[in-house]
Structure formats: C-alpha cells, structure tokens
Image: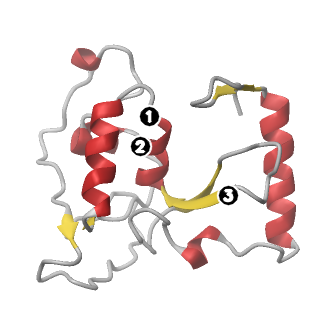
C-alpha cells in the first residue's frame, strides 16, 4: 500500500492505510461487517465480479466503508485526475447503466471503456482494437435484471 492523498488533500501514510486495512479485515473475519460481495456495488448495483470495500476515512476503518465493484472503485479513485470522464461514468450509472463485471484487476478497461487513465499522458496509451463493452441500461432494456454468469477465465466478460 502506498501513500494516498484523498480529495480533501489529506495525506494518508502507508502505515495508516495498512493499519486500517488490517482492522477492516479483522471486522470481516469476526463477522462485524458483511463481505462486500454479499452486499454488491453501492453505485452500479453489480453483484458479480470483483467487489471490494472503498474506505472513505482510514481513521474509522469500519464506519465509512462503501462496497464497490472494481470498475466503480477505480473510477472513484480517478475522479481527481479525470473528473469529466468520472462524472460521465457515474451519471450513466445513476441512470441505470451497468457494465459487465470485472473478474480481474485490469486498469486498462478504464481506458478502453471510459477513457480514464492513471497515466499522465493519455496519448501514450494504446487503445484496444476491440470495441468497448456496451453498457446496459438495466431499467430500460431487454437486459433488465440480467445476471452475468460467473466465469473461470481470466478475461473480462461481455454480454
């Protein structure tokens, strides 16, 4: 875990973040909080793929947790570097758009599907030749209540 500066400018040291992570893991093990996967993503309502907790305040490891799918979690972390793209993503999610679940921690999907990058120079990033996955409006499409099948492969699933 590296040092992290939150959106309020507070710098959380690696030691503070690691201590908070340990306390969160202990609370999970002791049954004080439910696993994030049981709850599902708080933003896009995804229940499959990687779902983990985002800690909004490392001083209170179990009080300010938000369960997020990998995609929503990484977009949230990219807000200060790519605010326009993050806003567009979360606006879409608020209207019911849902992307296929991420079954591996691959940051390149953020660039491919949302033009979000953690790199300083976007022009150096190569876009995938594959077309971006299509989002699903879970409220206004034939895919309402669609459940994505779990996969044993290491590639992201598409509808």
Nearer the observer, 73 or 124: 73
What residue is drawn where x is 26% and y is 83%? Answer: 146
Identify the residue under disc 3. 65
In this picture, residue 87 sits left or right of residue 47: left
Q: Which residue is mark 2?
A: 75
Which quadrant, please, contains the C terminus?
A: bottom left
Quadrant hosting residue 148: bottom left
On the image, numbered disc 1 is attached to which residue? 78
Whether the residues at callouts 3 and 1 have beta carbons within 8 Å, the answer is no
How crowded pointer 3 is (Cα within 10 Å; few <14, some 14-19, many 20+) is rated as some
Q: Quadrant of residue 121?
A: top left
Q: Residue at x 11, y 48 (%)?
A: 131
Label 1: how many Cα within 10 Å (few below 14, some 14–19, many 20+): some
Q: Is residue 13 visible?
A: yes
The front one of 107 and 68 is: 68
Q: Is residue 129 left or right of residue 13?
A: left
């Amino acid at each position: 875990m590296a040092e992290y500066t939150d959106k309020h400018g507070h710098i959380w040291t690696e030691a503070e973040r690691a201590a908070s992570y340990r306390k969160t893991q202990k609370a999970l093990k002791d049954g004080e909080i439910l696993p994030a996967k049981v709850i599902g993503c708080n933003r896009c309502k995804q229940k499959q793929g990687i779902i983990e907790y985002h800690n909004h305040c490392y001083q209170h490891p179990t009080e300010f947790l938000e369960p997020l799918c990998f995609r929503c979690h990484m977009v949230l972390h990219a807000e200060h570097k790519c605010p326009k793209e993050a806003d567009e993503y979360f606006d879409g999610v608020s209207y019911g758009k849902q992307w296929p679940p991420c079954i591996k921690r691959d940051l390149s999907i953020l660039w491919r599907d949302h033009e979000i990058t953690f790199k300083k120079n976007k022009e150096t990033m190569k876009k995938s030749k594959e077309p971006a996955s299509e989002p699903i409006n879970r409220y206004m499409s034939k895919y309402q209540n669609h459940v994505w099948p779990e996969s044993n492969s290491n590639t992201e699933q598409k509808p």
